[in-house]
Amino acid sequence: MRLLAIVIFSTVLALASARAEEKAAEKPPDAPVFVTLPPITIPVFEGDTIARQASLVLALELAKGRTEADLSPYRAKLVDAFIADLTDIFERRSFEERVIDPQAIKPRLRETTARIAGPGLVTDVLIQQAMERARRR
């Protein structure tokens, strides 16, 4: 049964990969470029204890004509700065029902991006996935 599940999973994964490559080849040259960053998970403290954790997957929309290679020199600094920004935002919102508030997060991350990478490279910061999870006790 496990072998069958592995075979099916591998086949689906291979087909999805092939389809993604086809779509990438079809993309018009002036289409926007999105760079997905690694998932960021931040512990949320209430007092001295970790009450929950918040995770985000962010993508950066690059300006027209820009490529992932243009962003590459700034990528590590951006991720570090995003972790610092998100930690600060979540700390301030730790007693709210939800710490992840796109209206509070996106403008701050846009400012940080412009400060680090300069204006004109990234046009938007997108939240692709957001999750909050209570700490297991």
Image: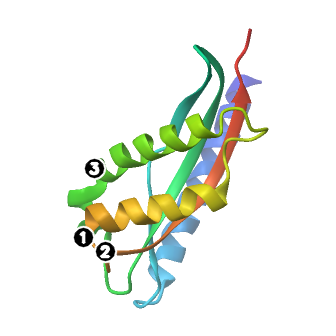
What residue sits 27% from the left and 61% below the top?
116
Q: CA distance from mark 3 to mark 2?
A: 18 Å
Residue 23 vs residue 54, the one in the foreground:
54
From the viewer's perspective, tell me whether residue 77 is left or right of residue 59.
left
Check disc 3: other Cα within 10 Å, few if <14, some if 14-19, many if 20+.
Answer: some
Q: Residue at x 54, y 66 (%)?
A: 20
Say which element carries label 3. helix
Which one is in front in this view, the residue at disc 3 or the one at disc 2?
Answer: 3
At horizontal 79% and vertical 38% (from top left) the residue drawn is 97
**Labels 1 and 2 touching (C-beta < 8 A):** yes
Mark 3 lies on residue: 77
Read off the residue under disc 2: 67
Of the two numbered discs 3 and 1 on the same chain, state the one appearing first in sequence.
1
- Does 65 sit above or below residue 128? below
N-terminal of the pair, mark 3 or mark 2, is 2
| Amino acid found under the numbered disc labelled 1 | Asp
Residue found farthest to the top: 137
**CA gap, disc 1 to disc 2?**
5 Å
**Nearer to us in this view, 112 or 72:** 112
Tag 1 residue: 70
Above or below residue 134? Residue 56 is below
x and y, in percent, of residue 111 in the image:
41, 65
